Image: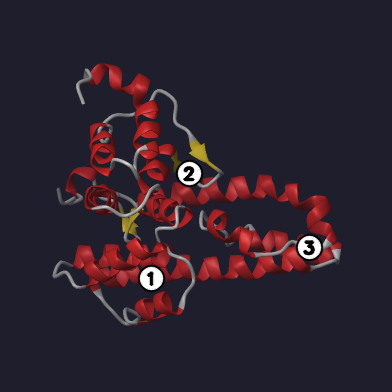
Amino acid sequence: MELNDGKLPAVHNLILLLASAIADTDPGKSAALFERTAHSRPLVRFTFGKSGVDLGSMSAWTGGSSPALDAVRMKRLDGAATDQAIAVEVFSALQCGQTSFLESYVDEQLTRPQPAEIARGIMVAGFCNQSPRNDRILENYKNTTGLPGKAYAAAIAAYRSDSWARHWFKVICDTNDPVTFWQAGVLFAQCVDGRFSAWKDDFAQTGAPIAAFGTSLNNSLKRRHEKLGKERAKNLFGQDAPSGIFVHSTD
């Protein structure tokens, strides 16, 4: 794309929207647009919800599978330099219905020889939705040492927290007791992360308290996402994150 680098920030978001719009009809050109914006930053950063999922990640995961777009998505996962960056990519993929891609990515990473690549696959599995498949994958690394072992500890903590978030959200949705609603709301806000946007509609909100007071959860959700995002942004594979220049991304 012929555009001066200095002008990119002003049109960064427009390029992302265009790339997303043509993802299914012209995946090659869409991928080229994503690549053109890969190293620029928008003047205004748009996010979806409170979890830090941004326009760049959501746009990249929109659209069907194609070699060109899948290469962009793989590069985004490979190049994510913190646990928060990995989480944002996974949460975006989940919201865009790209579970199959994530499963294939995890399978490939876990067969690679480098501990860092295995660790990345473990983290992606830990940020995915609850499933027997992900249960088995994480269980396989329960007693692993080294970098994969560190990643397992961080991944299983995130995975179990999501399980508890689902449990408490179901209580919130079902109960007709205001006290139970408030108690479950407090516990829910201690467990939830960005996956909530991908699975919240799976639960029917039948209780009277959630109909009347559901919006009261928004502030605690915002605080939780901000706190968790800051913590994860400091780490990679559950350890202090190295400088981004040391994170390998395949071209």
Amino acid type at image mark 2 = Gly
Label number found at residue 234: none
Which of pointers 1 and 2 indicates the residue nearer the eye? Answer: 2
Earlier-in-chain disc, 3 versus 1? 1
Q: Amino acid at mark 1?
A: Ala
Residue in view at x 55 percent, y 70 percent: 163
Q: Residues within 10 Å of mark 2 (few under 14, many from 20)?
A: many
Q: In this orientation, which residue lies closer to the viewer: 218 or 246? A: 218
**Which mark is drawn over residue 181?**
3
Please say if 74 is above or below 106.
above
First in sequence: mark 2 or mark 3?
Answer: 2
Which residue appears at 29% of the width and 40% of the height? 26
Res 176 → quadrant: bottom right
Element type at marker 3? Answer: helix
In front: mark 3 or mark 1?
3
Kindly tell me whether residue 103 is visible in this rendering: yes
Determine the residue located farthest toward the front in the rendered image.
25
Name the N-terminal-most of marks 1 and 2.
Answer: 2
Residue 234 shows in the view: no
- Distance between the Cα atoms at labels 2 and 3? 26 Å
Kindly identify which residue carries mark 2: 52
Q: Position of residue 102 (x, y in %)?
A: 34, 62
Amino acid type at circle 3 is: Phe
Q: Pointer 1: what residue?
A: 153
Measure the alpha-carbon separation of dots 3 and 1: 31 Å
Locate residue 241, reporting x and y percent: 29, 51
Q: Quadrant of the N terminus?
A: top left
User: Dot 3 surroundings within 10 Å: few (below 14), some, or many (20 or more)?
Assistant: many
